[in-house]
Image: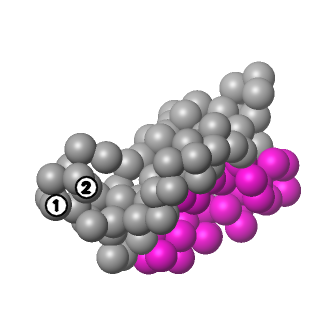
Amino acid sequence: MVLHDAGEVQRVGILDFDEHCGDGTDDIIARLGLKWVVHFTAGRRYHHASQAKEFLKAIPAIVCKMADCDVILYQAGADPQVDDPLGGWLRTSGSNITGPDQ
């Protein structure tokens, strides 16, 4: 908000690949009326191992929707990671994802 208020950025993207649906972030954006913030959360749509390949394939299009953002904040989380007890949905035989930033 400081950068926006200072005129340093016009739009901010939040790329949230955490398993949880990001409703806390959505709530903050709505309460503060931050129409200049673009928020995507993986947890809203992707929940199962059967969706892992679809999710990985969708990442470029998701990022492209934030092309007009001056800055993108990336929340990696660890929930989609194979061994995470809250998620673990990125366990396809074709993916070698072993950490949140891979």
Quarter of the image where one finds residue 58: bottom right
Give the residue at mark 1.
7
The range drawn in magenta is 39-65
Give the residue at mark 2.
4
Main secondary structure found in the magenta portion: helix
Determine whether, in the image, residue 30 is placed left or right of residue 88: left
Determine whether, in the image, residue 14 is placed left or right of residue 82: left
Residue found at the far top of this picture: 85
Q: Is residue 9 above or below residue 25?
A: below
Mark-to-mark CA distance, 1 and 2 = 5 Å
Question: What element does badge 2 sit on?
Answer: helix
Q: Nearer the viewer, residue 37 or 13?
A: 37
Image spot of residue 55 (x, y percent): 67, 62
Image spot of residue 96 (x, y percent): 58, 46
| Residue 37 seen in render | yes
How dense is the environment of label 1, judged by Cα within 10 Å: few (below 14), some, or many (20 and up)? few
Amino acid tagged 1: Gly
Q: Is residue 11 magenta?
A: no
| Residue 102 seen in render | no
Q: Nearer the viewer, residue 73 or 11?
A: 11
Question: What element does badge 1 sit on?
Answer: loop
User: Mark 1 touching mark 2, by CB under 8 A?
Assistant: yes
Q: Nearer the viewer, residue 59 or 15?
A: 15
Seen at 33% across and 76% down, the residue is 68
Seen at 61% across and 70% down, the residue is 57
Q: Is residue 42 magenta?
A: yes
